Amino acid sequence: QIVCYHMYGHKEAFSRYATWFAVWTQLFFLLSGFVLAYAELAKPPKTGNSRLSLLRYVRRRLTVIYPAFFLALLLRVTYHPGKTPFEWSMLPLHAMLMQSWLPICIATESGSITCSPWLFNGEAWFLSVLLIFWLFLRPLAEMFRQRSLTFCSVTIVVCWIWSYVYQIAGNHNRLASALGFGELGSIIVMVAIRATPIGFFNVFIAGVAAARIFIVVATKDADTGGSVSLETRKVALAATNAPKGLRY
């Protein structure tokens, strides 16, 4: 669906449907929060030298995706180089995966507005957002490790409601209009919601909370067969107790 959105969104006969496929971006961040948090919560908390530093943790994740990203960026710059000082000034941020940390936009002399997240290899903006979430993942996972099922369920509901807040604020530029922003300000607000961590932090947190719920209701201590606790060394699927929707 995301491929259709990027490849065919400009097709007149398909555009009204393709734009809806962009919502799958939220599913990606939800799954990212769930999978990464589950990997942390399914094993006992590490301390001291056995715990990876934040720098090593992020570096290990970047090792998988950064070579391909940098190659794509290099090819993009080679064949479609930046034409304005603003585009060139944003290139270091793209190289460091920082292009979507803030909604940086500028009005050009021709009257158009250019924004950092979508320059060069614009479809890779989500990696910049994901990098920020990696920095907060382990503290979030450790916080939810000690929270109850009720707390995690309420968190998901609050995150879901917050998505509607963004929908209402962003639809027809309501928030920008209420704040008295002009065209540039309206675009900055839109970019902040659609292409920065601000617009997706609630989705990622919901994924982390969902991982904790899955651990509590659908897994057990593989050694004792009891409930998962801070002393659990390995978890296993609690096939008899888990809700049917979580068994597969």
Image: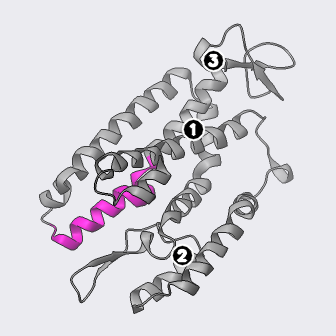
Q: Foreground residue, 4 or 247?
A: 4
For mark 2, give the secondary structure: helix
Pointer 3 local density, CA inside 10 Å: few below 14, some 14–19, many at least 20:
some
For mark 1, give the secondary structure: helix
How far, Cα to Cα, is label 2 from label 3? 41 Å
Instruction: Identify the amino acid type marked 1.
Output: Val
Residue indicated by mark 1:
208
Q: Position of residue 19 (x, y in %)?
A: 34, 50
Q: Position of residue 54 (x, y in %)?
A: 70, 59
Residue at point 33%, 77% (across, down): 114
Q: Which mark is residue 217?
A: 3
Residue at point 35%, 56% (across, down): 193
Which SS type dominates the magenta stretch? Answer: helix
Q: Foreground residue, 89 or 76?
A: 76
How far, Cα to Cα, is label 1 from label 3? 15 Å
Residue at point 52%, 77% (across, down): 93
| In this view, 148 is above or below 75 | above
How far, Cα to Cα, is label 1 from label 2? 27 Å
Q: Tell me: 222 left or right of 216.
A: right
Residue indicated by mark 2:
94
> Which numbered disc, 1 or 2, marks the residue closer to the eye?
2
Q: Position of residue 167 (x, y in %)?
A: 27, 45
Q: Foreground residue, 16 or 219?
A: 16
Q: Which mark is residue 240?
A: none
Q: Do the residues bearing badges 1 and 3 touch, measured as CB atoms within 8 Å?
A: no
For mark 3, give the secondary structure: helix
Q: Foreground residue, 3 or 188?
A: 3
Asked if the magenta segment contains residue 141, the reply would be no
- Pick whichever of labels 1 and 2 is earlier in the sequence: 2
Q: Which residues are magenta?
A: 181-201
